Amino acid sequence: MNLRGRQKGLTSVEFAIIGTVALLVLFGSIEVGRAVFVMNTLNETTRRAARIATVCPINDPAIREVAMFNVPGGGTASQFVSRLGPANISLEYLDRSGDPITDPTANFGQIHYVRTRIVDYQHEMLIPFASYFFSAPEFGTTLRRESLGVPRQGPVRAC
């Protein structure tokens, strides 16, 4: 038997090995890119929540909805980040020294800052035949208060 006959099918085996590695690298790169997208979206969510909270009435439910890229009254689940809900967005009103105010409605005049954070968010990696979750860091944004939904004249309106 010649050398050609003994190597028949070798290219198929080599392709199967190299192809598997190449697909793992490709899909791993896609998954890392998706994880980076989710982390950037969580960071933007805190920025949006803080910005909306500075101009909306205290603890308005629309703050968390708009922060998750929904319209006010548009639902409680984010359209862009799976498993992100209003419970994952912490909203705090802070006094001049940066300490949280326990009852912001009763102490409206003491509010100087608004802080929002992403808390207890678990990101699921899409790995075939396995579920892998990792905790996202607590992204946060603090902004100076503005109107807090109280106009110069007229009644307070929801966002």
Image (cartoon, rainbow, N blue to C red):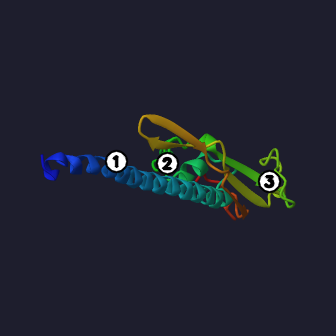
Give coordinates of residue 49: x percent, y percent.
62, 55
Any part of residue 25 in sight: yes
Instruction: Identify the residue at image location x=45%, y=41%.
Output: 127
Give coordinates of residue 115: x percent, y percent.
72, 56
From the viewer's perspective, is the residue at label 3 or at label 1 nearer? 1
Between 23 and 15, the one nearer to me in the picture: 15
Between 117 and 58, the one nearer to me in the picture: 117
**Residue tagged 3:** 108
Asked if residue 18 is positioned above or below residue 77 in the image, the reply reads: below
Cα distance in 3D space between marks 3 and 2: 33 Å
Q: Which amino acid does label 1 sit on?
A: Thr
Give coordinates of residue 144: x percent, y percent.
74, 65
Cα distance in 3D space between marks 3 and 1: 61 Å
Instruction: Identify the residue at image location x=42%, y=34%.
Output: 129
- Label 2 or label 1, whichever comes before in sequence order: 1
- Label 3 or label 1, whichever comes before in sequence order: 1
**Residue tagged 1:** 20
Give coordinates of residue 134: x percent, y percent.
59, 43
**Residue tagged 2:** 81
> Helix or strand or loop: what does disc 3 sit on?
helix
